[in-house]
Image: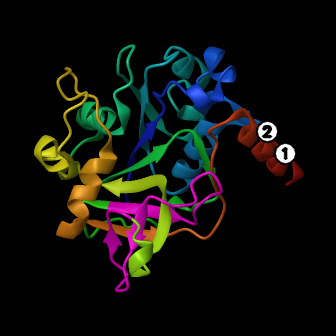
């Protein structure tokens, strides 16, 4: 059973302004709960016991709102990244000492989903295992491709009849996924900083042809709550039951 999880919550939330000027996006409410509280409850139900939340923008609001996690039977630790968010890769790298050496779940704090975290592999067959969903209207081209043999590919390829899907921001990772990240990802921007700022996506794309990233499909509800309009729409749906 996977007992550790990382929730990405450090972003500035530019598309959610002006709401995110005063409240971090994961702490905004939908359906009577903060977005991040839905994740915490679902992670706890799946057997997770320790959660690391990375923070930057309005960081002090997280421990004030969520405390130590006891209300969900969790232990919450906070990984403060400083005034500048480190993006997903930099944030994961900084949080690793708090996550230990076993596989851990990672999830974007500004999404909502009915995904059952207990369906994730407890012993992932690769360095990373990603959850993919049908492409939403605001991302019609998707993120990755599924080839004719069902293998995950770095990019969609309509000309080859590969199926395009969108990354749900949910995955299981072995800490080793970050090994040699600088060379494999080919990144330069942000990596000169200490701590470095970089996204996991180029690294995952580099690992896919090596067979180091597996995947599963979620056919249920998932939304990237990226704008005030999508937040209002989600709130309305959740209040309808």
Looking at the rendered structure, the number of numbered marks drawn on it comes to 2
Q: What kind of secondary structure does the magenta stretch mostly adopt?
A: loop
Question: Does 153 appear in magenta?
Answer: yes
Q: Is residue 18 above or below residue 185?
A: above
Q: Residue drawn at (49%, 17%), measured in percent from left and top?
A: 59
The spot of residue 25 in percent (x, y) is: 60, 29
The spot of residue 51 in percent (x, y) is: 43, 39
Q: Can residue 43 be seen here?
A: yes
Q: Circle 1 sits on which residue?
A: 236
Q: In which quarter of the image is residue 31?
A: top right
Q: Circle 2 sits on which residue?
A: 232
Q: Is residue 81 above or below residue 90?
A: above
Would residue 86 appear left or right of 110 to someone viewing this image?
left
Q: Which residue lies furthest to the bottom in this view?
A: 149
The spot of residue 64 in percent (x, y) is: 57, 17
Question: Does 5 appear in magenta?
Answer: no
| Of residues 93 and 45, the one drawn nearer to the viewer in this rendering | 93
Q: Quadrant of the C terminus?
A: bottom right
Q: Residue drawn at (54%, 33%), measured in percent from left and top?
A: 70
**Are the two marked residues, 1 and 2, in contact with CB atoms closer than 8 angstroms?**
yes
- Count residues near mark 2 (Cα–Cα under 10 Å), then give few for <14, some for 14-19, many for 20+: some
Q: Residue furthest right?
A: 240
| Of residues 60 and 226, the one drawn nearer to the viewer in this rendering | 226
- Count residues near mark 1 (Cα–Cα under 10 Å), then give few for <14, some for 14-19, many for 20+: few
Q: Can residue 102 be seen here?
A: no
Would residue 164 appear left or right of 3 to someone viewing this image?
right
Q: In this view, does 91 lie above or below 126?
A: above
Q: Residue drawn at (51%, 14%), measured in percent from left and top?
A: 60
Q: What's drawn in magenta, residue-wise?
A: 129-155
- CA gap, disc 1 and disc 2: 6 Å
């Amino acid at each position: 059973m996977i007992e550790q999880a990382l929730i990405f919550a450090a972003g500035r939330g530019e598309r959610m302004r002006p709401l995110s000027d005063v409240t971090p996006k994961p702490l905004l409410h939908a359906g009577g709960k903060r977005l991040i509280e839905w994740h915490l409850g679902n992670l706890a139900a799946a057997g997770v016991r320790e959660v690391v939340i990375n923070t930057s923008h309005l960081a002090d609001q997280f421990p004030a709102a969520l405390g130590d996690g006891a209300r969900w039977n969790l232990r919450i630790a906070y990984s403060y990244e400083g005034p500048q968010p480190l993006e997903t890769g930099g944030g994961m790298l900084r949080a690793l000492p708090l996550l230990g050496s076993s596989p851990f779940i990672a999830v974007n704090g500004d999404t909502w989903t009915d995904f059952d975290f207990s369906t994730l592999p407890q012993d992932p067959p690769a360095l990373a295992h990603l959850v993919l969903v049908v492409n939403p209207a605001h991302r019609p081209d998707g993120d990755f491709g599924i080839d004719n043999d069902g293998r995950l590919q770095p990019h969609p390829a309509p000309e080859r009849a590969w199926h395009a899907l969108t990354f749900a921001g949910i995955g299981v990772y072995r800490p080793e996924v970050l090994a040699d990240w600088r060379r494999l990802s080919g990144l330069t921007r942000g990596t000169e900083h200490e701590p470095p700022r970089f996204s996991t996506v180029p690294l995952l794309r580099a690992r896919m042809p090596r067979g180091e990233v597996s995947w599963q499909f979620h056919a249920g509800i998932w939304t990237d709550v990226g704008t005030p309009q999508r937040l209002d729409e989600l709130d309305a749906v959740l209040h309808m039951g």
